[in-house]
Each structure stands twice: as structure tokens, then as C-alpha cells.
Amino acid sequence: VQLQAFGGGVVQAGGSLTLSCVASGGTFSTYVMGWFRQAPGKEREFVASITRSGGSTFYADSVKGRFTTARDNAKNTVFLQMSSLKPEDTAVYYCAVRKAAVVFSIRTKYYDYWGQGTQVTVSS
């Protein structure tokens, strides 16, 4: 499975940005998908996750109410819509695949494949 994330960039605080992640080489509709981020000098942290059908989502407390994840299984794509962005949201954002699972996980070790990451910078 290969993942390609894109849509990052520089945005002012309070602004919005939507990330996309396209999967290839597998059966996308059977994967739980996750979003993580890693700021300089910090560990990679969970942001959001979505079930195989897209019917359920789960968010980190730090982004709840501001970020929304969704997926389009026909296009093998998962999205992360980010609004009311804050400088502390600055990080490299990664999408990830969790195979053979039906539930979320916030732990990086339970995800099997990772995208290359896309940089999001929020200026104050």
C-alpha cells in the first residue's frame, strides 16, 4: 500500500486548510485510516481516525470541533479538513493505514503503512 498526502501549506492563524491522502496498491475500503502529526522536537501524535465505511470518526481533544476527517472510498482518498487553525497546529501531517481492523487506535504502532507527510505551517 502506498499513500500520498498533499494539500499542506502556510496559512494564517484562524484560517483553514484541507489535506488529502490518496492510497494505492490495496483495498482502500477495508482500511481504518488515521491522521497523525509531528512537530519539530516532538513525538508523532494522533489527530483523527475514520472507520472503513466513514460512518464513525474519532479526534484528539486538541483538534475536536476544528478538524473533520472524511473519506471517499470510490476515489481511495481520505481528507482532513482543518479550520480555526492555531500556531500550535504547525507540524508535518501524516496519513496512515490500519489493516485488518475495525476500530480506531491512537497508537502509531498499530498502523501498518504511512504516507510521506505534508507540512502545515500556521503563522500568528
Image (tube, rainbow, N blue to C red):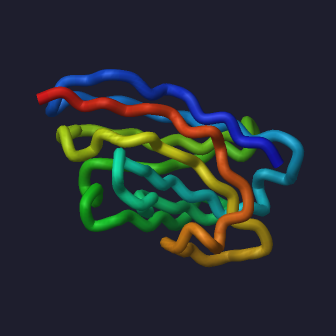
Which residue corresponds to the image point at 51% horizontal and 33% vertical from the top-left? 118
User: Residue 21: x, y in percent?
Assistant: 61, 38
Position above or below: 12 against 98: above
Q: Nearer the viewer, residue 81 or 87?
A: 87
In this rendering, would 112 be left or right of 94? right
Position above or below: 47 against 89: below
In this rendering, would 97 be left or right of 40? right
User: Residue 82: x, y in percent?
Assistant: 34, 40
User: Residue 55: x, y in percent?
Assistant: 56, 63
Q: Residue furthest front?
A: 41
Figure disc tally? 0
Q: Nearer the viewer, residue 89 or 80?
A: 89
User: Residue 109: x, y in percent?
Assistant: 62, 72
Which residue corresponds to the image point at 27% horizontal and 67% vertical from the top-left? 61
Which residue corresponds to the image point at 67% horizontal and 35% vertical from the top-left? 4
Q: Nearer the viewer, residue 43 or 90?
A: 43
Q: Which quarter of the figure has residue 18? A: top left
Q: Nearer the viewer, residue 2 or 33?
A: 2
In the picture, which quadrant includes the C terminus? top left
Which residue corresponds to the image point at 41% horizontal and 58% vertical from the top-left? 47
In this rendering, would 12 be left or right of 76? left
